[in-house]
Image (tube, rainbow, N blue to C red):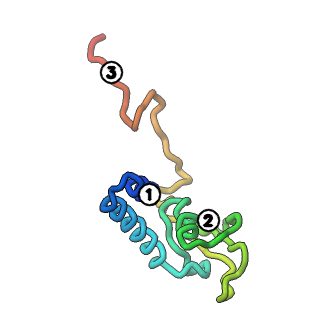
Amino acid sequence: MLNFLSFAHAQRGDTAQAAAYRDKMNLVLATIESSGDGLTEETPWHILMYAHAFDLLAAKNIPVRESSIISRTVEYIPRVKKDEKGVKGYYFDYGRIYWKKPEQGYKRERSWQFNNLKPWKSDKK
């Protein structure tokens, strides 16, 4: 989203706002890269959303193939071909997405809701 916002503001001629969104996006990507090296299952890059893995690789212009689940919290995304250093793919840890115990599930009251706002109920009977 930050990339799209940066692009949209640049197209409108608002270079200051475009630069601000581009800088935010680069900070998010740098944060992911600083969380590990992504080269082994023990040192994966940590992500908060599944899409962040592909966003990071796309930002680095790395063509990849379909990901595969390695463990309960780690996925592996192979490159289309090895790079000059022999790297075949990257590991991502998405375990933080499930810190709220996914096996318990999320129970939500069934009702009509819009943006998690409960429907208005009249006090009159």
In the picture, measured across the screen, residue 29 lies left or right of residue 86, that is left
Element at badge 3?
loop
Instruction: State the residue lying farthest toward the left.
Output: 123
Disc nearer the start of the sequence (3/1): 1
Name the residue nearer the viewer: 46 or 125.
46
Element at badge 2?
loop
State the CA–CA distance, disc 3 to disc 1.
43 Å
- Density class for disc 1 (Cα within 10 Å; few <14, some 14-19, many ≥20) is some
Picture quadrant where residue 93 is located = bottom right
The C terminus sits in image quarter = top left
From what the image shows, is residue 87 above or below residue 64?
A: below
**Residue 42 coordinates in the image, percent (x, y):** 57, 80
Circle 3 or circle 1, nearest the eye = 1
The N terminus sits in image quarter = bottom left
Q: Which residue is mark 2?
A: 72
**Residue 86 coordinates in the image, percent (x, y):** 68, 87
Instruction: State the residue lying farthest toward the front.
Output: 13
Q: Which residue is mark 1?
A: 7
Q: Which residue is mark 3?
A: 121
Q: Check disc 1 and give the amino acid type.
A: Phe
From what the image shows, is residue 121 above or below residue 58?
A: above
Name the residue nearer the viewer: 35 or 26.
26
Disc nearer the start of the sequence (2/1): 1
**Residue 79 coordinates in the image, percent (x, y):** 68, 74
Residue at left offset 32%, top offset 59%: 17
- Density class for disc 3 (Cα within 10 Å; few <14, some 14-19, many ≥20) is few
Residue at left offset 69%, top offset 72%: 78
State the CA–CA distance, disc 2 to disc 3.
42 Å
Q: Check disc 3 and give the amino acid type.
A: Lys
Asked if the residues shown at circle 3 and circle 1 are in contact, with their CB atoms under 8 angstroms apart, the answer is no
Tag of residue 33: none
Element at badge 1?
helix
